[in-house]
Image: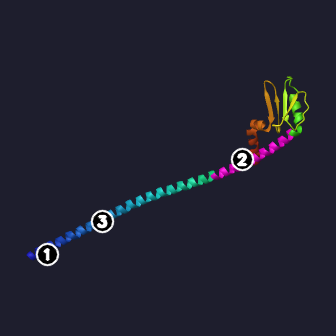
Amino acid sequence: MVEKLIKKLIEEAQTKAKKIIEDGEREYERKLEEEKKKLSIEFEEMLKKEKEKIDMEIEKEIINFKLEKEKEILEYKNQLIKKVEEKIEEKFNKFLNENMENIINEIVENIKKKDIQIYVPSSKKIKSNFSVINDENMKNSFKIKSDKWEIEFSWENLKNIFEEKIKEKANKLLFHE
């Protein structure tokens, strides 16, 4: 009888132990699945953040590349416009030097004041009803001066007045903009 009781207790203990082990294994499996899900979610979030970082870096590099290329194109356009301006200046100065006397006489023709002085480059011999002064510091220009006003006719002055229009026209002609 004691043996049966002991045997029964051992069987019950084994059954309880088996149940505890099975419960423990189920709990272990459940927690393992939970942890796998957590790790998977964390991994996906980290992966997403890293992809976003990489995408942002790539986007920045693309933007920087585009800006660099646009800067190069702008520099090239500015060089072309500068060459156009230089050619215009060259043609203007040639025209001015070849026609200086006629230009001056047409300008002063309607001036009623007699105290006018005309400054021209020392290499020019200009005939005028007004005082003509050869100035060795002048080149590719002339100046008409009164006691109250002064006008200098040169490429620099005209360029300052018309520079925006010159650049605008050069852009249209060169780049169809």
Quadrant hosting residue 42: bottom left
The structure residue drawn at horizontal position 23% and vertical position 68%, both measured from the top left corner, is 19
Distance between mark 2 and mark 3 Cα atoms: 73 Å
Q: Provide the residue designation for mark 1.
A: 7
Q: Which mark is residue 28?
A: 3
Quadrant hosting residue 138: top right
Quadrant hosting residue 117: top right
As drawn, is 54 to the left or to the right of 100? left
Distance between mark 1 and mark 2 Cα atoms: 104 Å
Question: Could you say whether the residue bearing mark 2 is in a helix, strand or loop?
Answer: helix
SS assignment for the magenta stretch, majority: helix
Q: Amino acid at mark 2?
A: Asn
Question: Which-is-in-front pick, marks 2 and 3?
Answer: 2
Question: Which-is-in-front pick, marks 1 and 2?
Answer: 2
Q: Are marks 1 and 3 in contact (CB under 8 Å)?
A: no
Q: Provide the residue designation for mark 2.
A: 78
Q: Amino acid at mark 1?
A: Lys
As drawn, the residue found furthest toward the front would be 136
Q: Residues within 10 Å of mark 1 (few under 14, many from 20)?
A: few
The structure residue drawn at horizontal position 52% and vertical position 57%, both measured from the top left corner, is 54
Which sits earlier in the primary sequence, circle 1 or circle 2? Answer: 1
Distance between mark 1 and mark 3 Cα atoms: 31 Å
The structure residue drawn at horizontal position 86% and vertical position 40%, both measured from the top left corner, is 95
